[in-house]
Image (cartoon, rainbow, N blue to C red):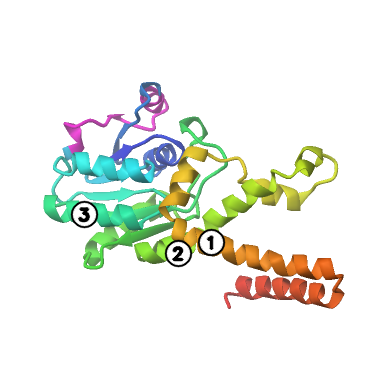
């Protein structure tokens, strides 16, 4: 089997390394930075550079680009994909990509499945990629509603083989709704929190809670701004809910209302326990 990978940043580079470490598949990869293509070849993460000619040899094509660039790539190469190839993206939003790609897949005879590997770090770029990045992590897949079970089983087997802990099938709409809370809001909060003037004086006065809350404050602003705007409706709902919730704590503090404050804190603690139990 031959796998093509477009984009050799943290995710694309880690996918290439995971495939080479866990399978005997041939990997053809392309990054716009030619030095990265060379580095991937030298490190054994790829067997050669993916181009317009050998793209047609690929049974799987993994696209690790930003959302708009993903759509542009599929549009430009739809007629070049191998008939029956499985094309999967790795962007953090799904609705717009899946809508555009599904039409092209039907027209040109390839399969498109939206994908989102739930793994990453605060660092970016091929030099931070590693084969173990996805070990035990979930892989989210958003196939077209009429996709055949054999193709879905093929995709699931592929990702489980390269180290993912589970494969979760969902819809693009459900994906974007949930990811606004589990990922995007967390990045907004972390990024805003660290802007406090107190942040520069945290040393010696901070421990695990500070580290946990600020871990994803350092991010790739180009990528995350695009992701936020692509999913702004869902993200705005989550931000509004958080603002309203924080307002309750603020009101209780302003009023010196100990009972209300304790009730709010207890409610949050109990909610955390229920969530951890799966309720």
State the image coordinates of residue 61 (x, y, percent, origin top left).
Answer: 27, 44
Viewer-nearest residue: 223 or 143: 223
Residue at mark 2: 177
Along the horizontal axis of the image, is 137 left or right of 47?
Answer: right
> Is the Cβ of the residue at disc 1 closer than 8 Å to that at disc 3?
no
Which class describes the residues within 10 Å of circle 1: few (<14), some (14-19), or many (20+)? some
> In the image, what residue occupies the spot 33% across and 40% down?
69
Viewer-nearest residue: 7 or 201: 201
Q: Where are the magenta residues, as a range?
A: 36-55
Residue 275 against residue 48 in the figure, above or below? below
> Is the Cβ of the residue at disc 2 closer than 8 Å to that at disc 1?
yes
Along the horizontal axis of the image, is 277 left or right of 235?
Answer: right
Label 2, label 3: how far apart the Cα atoms are: 24 Å
Q: How many marks?
A: 3
Q: Which mark is residue 111?
A: 3
- Secondary structure found at label 2: helix
Residue 265 against residue 196 in the figure, above or below? below
User: Which quarter of the picture shows residue 203?
Assistant: top right
Mark with earlier residue (2, 3):
3
Q: Which mark is residue 181?
A: 1
State the image coordinates of residue 214 (x, y, percent, origin top left).
Answer: 67, 47
């Amino acid at each position: 089997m031959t796998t093509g990978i477009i984009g050799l940043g943290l995710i694309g580079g880690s996918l290439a390394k995971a495939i080479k470490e866990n399978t005997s598949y041939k990997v053809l990869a392309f990054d716009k930075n030619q030095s990265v293509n060379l580095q991937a070849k030298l490190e054994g993460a790829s067997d050669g550079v993916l181009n317009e000619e050998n793209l047609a040899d690929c049974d799987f094509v993994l696209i690790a680009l930003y959302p708009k660039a993903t759509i542009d790539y599929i549009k430009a190469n739809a007629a070049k994909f191998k008939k029956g190839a499985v094309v999967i993206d790795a962007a953090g939003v799904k609705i717009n990509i899946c809508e555009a790609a599904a039409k092209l897949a039907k027209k040109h005879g390839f399969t498109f499945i939206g994908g989102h590997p739930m793994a990453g770090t605060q660092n970016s770029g091929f030099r931070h990629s590693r084969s173990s990045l996805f070990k035990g992590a979930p892989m989210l897949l958003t196939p077209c509603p009429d996709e055949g079970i054999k193709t879905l089983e093929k995709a699931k087997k592929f990702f489980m083989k390269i180290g993912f802990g589970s494969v979760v099938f969902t819809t693009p709409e459900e994906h974007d709704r949930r990811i606004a809370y589990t990922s995007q809001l967390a990045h907004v909060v972390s990024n805003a929190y660290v802007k406090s003037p107190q942040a520069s004086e945290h040393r010696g006065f901070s421990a695990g809670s500070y580290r946990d809350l600020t871990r994803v404050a350092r991010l790739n602003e180009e990528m995350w701004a695009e992701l936020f705007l692509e999913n702004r409706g869902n993200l705005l709902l989550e931000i509004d809910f958080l603002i309203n919730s924080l307002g309750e704590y603020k009101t209780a503090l302003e009023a010196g209302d100990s009972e209300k404050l304790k009730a709010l804190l207890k409610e949050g603690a109990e909610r955390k326990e229920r969530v951890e139990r799966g309720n």
